[in-house]
Image (cartoon, rainbow, N blue to C red):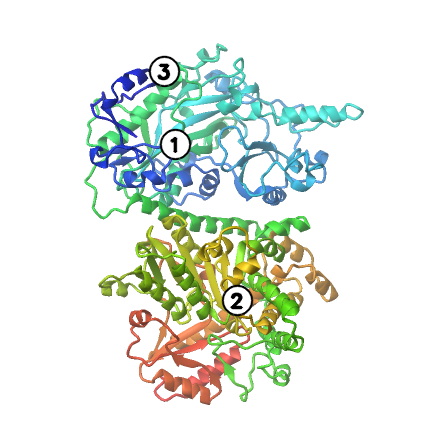
Amino acid sequence: LFQPLLPHEEGATPTAADDDHTTKQQSRWIDTSPYATTSSDDKPEISFLWENAPRYETKSIRDTVQVYSHLPNGIHVLDDKWALARLMMIPSSHNCSGNHDEALATLESHCFRGSDGFRIFAQRVGLLSSNENDADNNNVNSEAQYQFEDLLQTTQQHHQLLPPPPPPKNLWVIKDAMSNGAGGIWIVDPFNAHEFTDNNNKDQQQQPMILHPQHRYIAQQYAWPPTLYKSRKCHVRVYGLITSDGRAYVHERAFLHVANEIFEYDSSSSNDGGATKEGNTDNKRRERFEPSVHITNCCANSHDEDKFSGEICVELDKPGPFSTSHSNGSSDVGVGSGNGDLPLGDYFPSIAASVAMLAEKSAAYVQGGQANDGFEYLGLDFVLSSVPDEGGEDSTRRKPVAYLLEVNAPPSQDTATGLTHAEELHDEVISDLLRLWVLPHLGIESSRSENGWKCVYSPPSLLKEETSIDVEEKPSNLIVPSKAAILNKIRWAMFEKKASKEYESSWHKEEVVGEENDRKSHKCESEKADSSFDADSFVSFVRSQFPCFSASTITSLSSAETPESENIFLESGGGAQVPLVVVDAMSASLMNRDRSVVGAKYLSEARKSIASLLAGCHRDDEEVQNRDGEQAVILGANATSLLDILARMYVENELITRDDEIVIASENHLANVTPWIKAAESVGARIKWWTATKCQEQQSSGTEESSSVLSDLVTERTRIVAVSHASNILGRVRDISAVCSLVREVTMNRGHVIVDGVAAAPHLLSRGSQASWYVVSLHKLFGPHLGCLIGRRSIALQVANIEGQLSNEKLCREYEMGTMNYEACAGAIALKEYFNELGIKAWRRSGDYEGVHCHSQTQTAQITSTQASGDQVVERSSALSNSAHLSIARTCIFQVEIRLLHSILGYLRKISRVRIIEDVGDMKVTLDGGCISNSINERRIPIVTFVHELIPSSQIVEHCRNHGVICRACKFLATTKLWDEMNLNEYDGVVRFSFAHYNNISDIQRTIHVLEMLREWR
């Protein structure tokens, strides 16, 4: 960044020709960049900053300048092909300014990852066929007469055009989402689609996969029919602008870029036999997908000076008729300005509609740039085409449209050719940008009033007919742009998750059966069971697995009934019952002790089983094992002791210092509170509280800070954020991914998120995959007394202060104390077997599996491909992976628990003297939408706590226990802050009912009957 000491003429900038002059008069320029050696006192204040991309080093500058060349998170949303596809595939919610919706033209787009994702996409749209000859089923009638439109035809010729060729049945453009220029672009149809699937490579060592397994790709429908220029395919480079007030502009001048080769696409393949067939097919393949025919970027065509058309200047404010004066055959056709430019105003309404929609759809994810009056300068590529003019009298007439292909933010500051006419157009666009937005916001009046920028969109909050720029004094409470960028990234992550889910659900009923090894790459997500799921039958089987519930009474009665003599267990939150398979495994380990062999094997297998059990629905067993080296699974006596060890190691290895901050959720169990308070006190770090209600914010005092909005608390100095996956009192499931995204962005990966999953794990069977550390207690997960702390290997090494290579087993031992409880490890291994058996049993009983959907792309297709029963069901269930069985079990558990939860909550809400202690919706990640309760199904775990205005909690529990309902009342090791927030200080504790998947509706009914027996209950 260099700033002149002497004022220059408006619009003048130093050029290469001024190098000598600049060198001789270096005193006229001051380096004001973050890398400058000049004293900060000698640096003048910067008013306007223009940089290609935000850099960390310029953060303090761009947050304080008057005008900045980017919007918060603008590049990540507007310069990403994947993001563009997500935005443009969603229908507009309301008309854009100028009623451009009628002119809007969009291309069907799909997002996928790697060759596996391509295969799923190709199957869905019918790209893959058994052979290439079968694939070519869209041949054009050779006797019919067709013609492509050409920009150089006169108006008379335009009306006399023959109709364009019919569209190919399946013609797509595949793009690498992060590539630029001509690289990473392929033309695909049924003829060559098999080349993009990894299993169709005949020699994978010499012919590597075309698509990288980890890259993101976009499949965009080929724009048909393409409007040509001199019989060649072309596109228009349009310049756009989105400003911090939400407006969008398009400049009247643009460039036309043209492919080198004559355009043709033969949808039929050669069927000639004989010795020449293979050679003819290869030639036809090369011609059919030749980049110089289809790709119009300058970088793909400029190598051939004889054919390259250069950069043709375009006027978007001047409609046809198309002039014949441009057909002189020179490479500088259409250059110059004024009448020499190619008039393409007929396409402007369609271009404007796309830019307006882009501005509308991206607004939520680039907001917050008012403090530095940010803007995003865009280079938009449109391919020209036409569609039938349904509103016209002439049925053969076609209407010009423009399809948005991609966006560069910002476009290159130099033209592709460096030719004079091109540089003049480019300079005019940028000079108009300065006059439109920058100079007014710097308080500088421009000497020129005319401007080439046309407003095509204004947000509803602004007057649509108002296009002038109003410069007002900025309010003092505007959000800092760099912080706005972080919040925008979180909003985008939430939108991406929702859009991905909606996209997958739209294909659910039309899924195509894929190859068996597809399951390696697809996520499995359980959904709600439909009415065919028999919850009572499922619970009956579950209870038969637990010694606690008498087999004689269970088998003699429907699970919808519980004998009066049997206790009702509603205290799983304090310690769950244990299935027989776990008890047997622990007993067996005691009968055959061999510490160095059997014990060590138990320990190793227990780590794998717990990691697999809590991996959630995102990975199958094989992938968990492959990623085993990326996580450390640390075992201990319980969650409390493991968190205490962890906090002390952070302090001992100086990962928390005096200048650091620790954020703690007030809803946490003390096990995830006390260790961090002690750590902070020992080094002098600052504690901040993420509160469950807003009222606590007004009670903040002294050195403590609290807020119900996490983004208010997390700063660059935050080193620890301690949260609960679900509170053992409030029960609301928190969105750990959103928390981790916020912490990662704000702290630049220096902050760690420690999640207490003790209360949530028994119900979700899933941990926060992005969390730095996740802790559980197996005795609340239907297992033995054993704590487990799962952390990312890289963080585990850092916290243990270990450098170099170290096996995972040795790394875990750095955290573990003494000899491990091998009997408990044996029980942990069996615990996974128990849940696996639940999935198998549910699958066999459901028959066609319609009641317990598991949406792995291959697994769903495999499971629902036929209607099976009896032995066929048993045989097919054995083919499912363990992750599929766990996913089925997870779905069934959810269905059982949600029914119990709704039943008891519905009853308690009707009792006017009862106050349910629950989440009030104040606790959020971000202020305007990152509500952390928006997790899977906006779920809460089946824990219900309440107080009665007349009857003490302890008396309610005593009464319940006397009548066979096992529950509990106390403070459940909650923080004093939570007690204050919930106004519970006048109570001796809260009554807690905590259910599990072995409870049934009869338990709820008997519990309600017992409560009704209390005097003064109603």
Distance from the alpha carbon under mark 1 to that under mark 2: 51 Å
- Provide residue 655's location: percent of width, then percent of height: 39, 56
- Estimate the spatial distance between the alpha carbons at disc 2 and disc 3, rounded to whole Å: 74 Å
The quadrant holding residue 871 is bottom right
Q: CA distance from mark 1 to mark 3?
A: 24 Å
**Secondary structure state at the residue bearing disc 3:** loop
Query: Relative to 600, is 110 on the left or the right?
Result: left
Badges 2 and 3: C-beta atoms under 8 Å apart? Answer: no
In primary-sequence order, the first of circles 1 and 2 is 1
Q: What percent of the width, then of the height, locates residue 213?
A: 58, 42
- Per the image, label 1 sits on a secondary structure element best described as loop
Q: Amino acid at mark 1?
A: Pro
- Circle 1 is placed at which residue position? 410
Relative to 925, say whether 320 is above or below: above
What amino acid is at disc 3? Ser
* Residue where numbered disc 3 is placed: 337
Q: Residue 635: which disc?
A: 2
